[in-house]
Amino acid sequence: MAPYPTSLFMTVDFTQLLVGLLLLWFPRQWMRLGISVGTRRRRTGGKADQIQPWERREPGDPRISFRLEFGKVRNYVDLLRAAAGGLAIVGGFGILASLTSGGEGQALPAWQVFALQTAILGFGALTQILRYERRHVSLYPPIFYLSGLSLGLCSAWPALFAFVLIWGLNPMLGGPQWFLSAYALVILVFGFLFRAHGLTLPMVASGLFLLPVLLSLLARRPLVNLTRKPAPPVGSSG
């Protein structure tokens, strides 16, 4: 008996595919539904608005705050769901991919299945990058989400070493664009050194890290600094 439901063109595990799509395509901003009111109320208190001396940042500092980002629970949710969703789509760690080529007859070639897997991951990254807030679209750098995807694409050690190294280099980097650009290079280098899955998947991971940067350049708009709320574009109402 075949381990997967089989279609005419490729072998598909529909249950695993659905789980992967739900995990990867779930917009992060939906996590805030139902808790934003309570958050605003807590912030209106006198002591809640006070910033501790060690949490103060210089005005205009574009760097991503290590303390603030690692203190957000939603970042860990992003990390885990992207890792699980990526493994569901491309496989790894003993998990078979949800989409595979049948290899015979009218089955799709392996490269076409791989292209479909990459498109799924890319669309998932877009749902995290593009956020509709204050009646306009902002570009966010989904760092922890992309880090989770790198686990399935590059295996554990390259992903872990790249994650630790990039946060160690963070004080020397500029804003989110420089952070993600450096991350793309680091993940590619470690993927090349370990070669757990060859070079194709690390190249995909590197491309996904560069995707927010490319969108920012094409749109001529900066990526939102995660430590600040995005300001509405000039001329927008509200």
Image: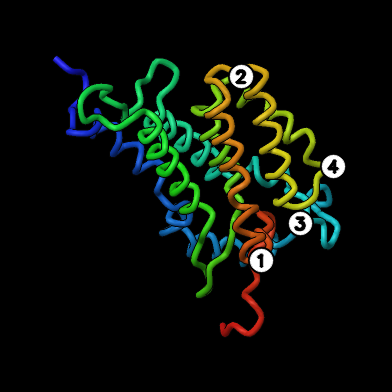
Chain-order first, disc 2 or disc 3: 3
Task: Give the SS element for disc 4.
Answer: helix
For disc 1, the neighbor class at 10 Å (few under 14, some 14 to 19, many from 20) is few
The mark lying in front, picked from 3 and 1, is 1
215 to 92, vertically: above or below:
below
Q: Which residue is mark 3?
A: 51
Q: Which residue is mark 2?
A: 157
Q: x and y percent of residue 9 in the render?
A: 22, 33
User: Which residue does the image show at 49% across and 66% down from the upper left?
Assistant: 132
Extreme residue in the front direction? 105
Task: Give the SS element for disc 1.
Answer: loop
The mark lying in front, picked from 2 and 3, is 2
Chain-order first, disc 2 or disc 1: 2
- Report, in whole angstroms, how far the alpha carbon at label 2 lies from the one at label 1: 34 Å
Q: Please identify the quadrant where the C terminus is shown.
A: bottom right
- Report, in whole angstroms, how far the alpha carbon at label 2 lies from the one at label 3: 37 Å
User: Which residue does the image show at 59% across and 60% down from the upper left?
Assistant: 139
Q: Which residue is mark 1?
A: 221
Whether the residues at callouts 4 and 3 have beta carbons within 8 Å, the answer is: no
Between residues 108 and 187, which one lies in front from this camera angle?
108
- Report, in whole angstroms, how far the alpha carbon at label 3 lies from the one at label 1: 29 Å
Amino acid marked by disc 3: Ile
The mark lying in front, picked from 2 and 1, is 1
For disc 3, the neighbor class at 10 Å (few under 14, some 14 to 19, many from 20) is few
Chain-order first, disc 4 or disc 3: 3
- Report, in whole angstroms, how far the alpha carbon at label 4 lies from the one at label 3: 24 Å
User: Which residue does the image show at 33% across and 30% down from the upper left?
Assistant: 109
Q: Which residue is mark 4?
A: 172
Task: Give the SS element for disc 3.
Answer: loop
Figure quadrant of residue 226: bottom right
**Res. 48 in view:** no
